[in-house]
Amino acid sequence: MKNKKKWIITGVILLIGAMTSVGVARSLEENIFEVQIVNPKMKTLATEVMLPGTLLVKDEQIIYHSPDKGNVYELLVEEGEIVEKGTPLIKYKSDSLLLQKEQHALTVEASNLRLSQIKNQENNLNKQKADLKKQKADLEKKEAELKKEIGKEEAVAMLEVEKQQIKAEERQILTQQQQFEYERKLIDLEIKQHQLQKRLIDSNEEELTVISNIEGKVIIANETVVTAYAESSPMILQIVNTEGFVVKGNLSEYDSLVVKEGQHVKIQSDAIHNEEWEGIVSHVAYSHITSEVAVKYPITVEIYSENNNQLRPGLQMILQIKTDERKSMVIPLSAILQESGVNHVFVVEENLAYKKEVELGIVYGDNIEIVKGLSADEKVIKEPMLTLHDGMEVIVLD
């Protein structure tokens, strides 16, 4: 009986010992974590600035009524018409300019009549000179014959009166010729004045004609505008180039420091689903505008995509501006732990987990940039447990 009890007690002790051993073994097994590891990867990371903007046509010309040109005008184009750069669009009518043109025409006509009269007088004078030259030649011939007949002195005396008469006519012709030359010079000056006046009239007339500064389509054409009691000049014409669009928005003070001209832009619209356009930053204003909320810097983005048939001026767009692009090391976000404001990861070496402090950069989807603290060949625990500590043994899963 005593021997039987002894064996029972021994069995119970052995059983308790066995159960304790199993419990300790299970506890040790539970503290060896199974982990998945990843290697840091090099990826191209892009930093972006996102902001709203309003779609506008790239080229637009709006022409308002100009009271200084007059109240009466003629439209030279129609609504819907396609115009080239330099096309005459509007011609104002000016009574004073019309009077100037009529006066100019009369003065030109008067000068032309005087010039024609002088030419006729010069022609007559040339005929008189030719006749006088012939008379002089005849007189010299007659004098030569008389010298043979009656002698030199008698011949000279006989023809003296005729010689004096010819000389008087020559002086008269010379005087008339000088007078005509003087009058012709005056007319030449008048003609130059007429030419200057014509250039001035043409210049004034050009100012009354408004031309197109762009190629585009006439979308508004008002043949008459109400000017009486108007606080501002009414619109007469609007021309837009529907082949080019820009988006205008405003940058914050911080974003204005990183957004530069020439940066690539992705453009979307909530109104047009599943569509995306490409663009480029064409202008960042140096001067700011102040609103009630904050200081803003105007920005212009030029769209260069060709799929712009659905675009309409006034649409609200979303701009994603790529401000930086670089190759960087990344790991999953889930690998990062933080303790007392310090970021760290766990790496595995010979089935042991070691804590490593890291410096983080930007978040890129499900990954995060590692600026400092890791090398590309290290094995990083993808999802470390909070109870994992430095030097703990782990089992790496395939």
Image (cartoon, rainbow, N blue to C red):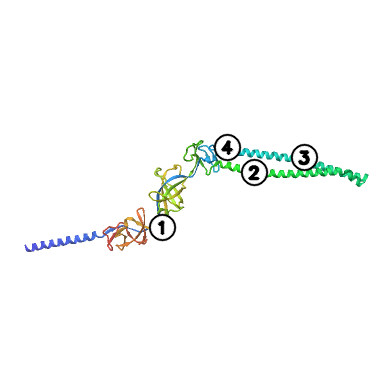
Circles 1 and 4: CB atoms closer than 8 Å:
no
User: In the picture, which quadrant includes the C terminus?
Assistant: bottom left
Q: Secondary structure at mark 1?
A: strand
Residue that carries the numbered disc 4 in the rendered image: 95
Q: Amino acid at mark 2?
A: Gln
N-terminal-most mark, 1 or 4: 4
Q: Secondary structure at mark 4?
A: helix
Circles 2 and 1: CB atoms closer than 8 Å:
no
**What is the quadrant of residue 172 in the picture?**
top right
N-terminal-most mark, 2 or 1: 2
Residue that carries the numbered disc 2 in the rendered image: 195
Q: Residue at x 20, y 61 (%)?
A: 24
Residue 130: x %, y % from top left: 80, 42
Residue that carries the numbered disc 3 in the rendered image: 124
Instruction: Judge by depth and name the residue closer to the eye, 14 or 84.
Output: 84
- In the rendering, which numbered label is found on residue 210? none
Q: Is residue 233 left or right of residue 330?
A: right
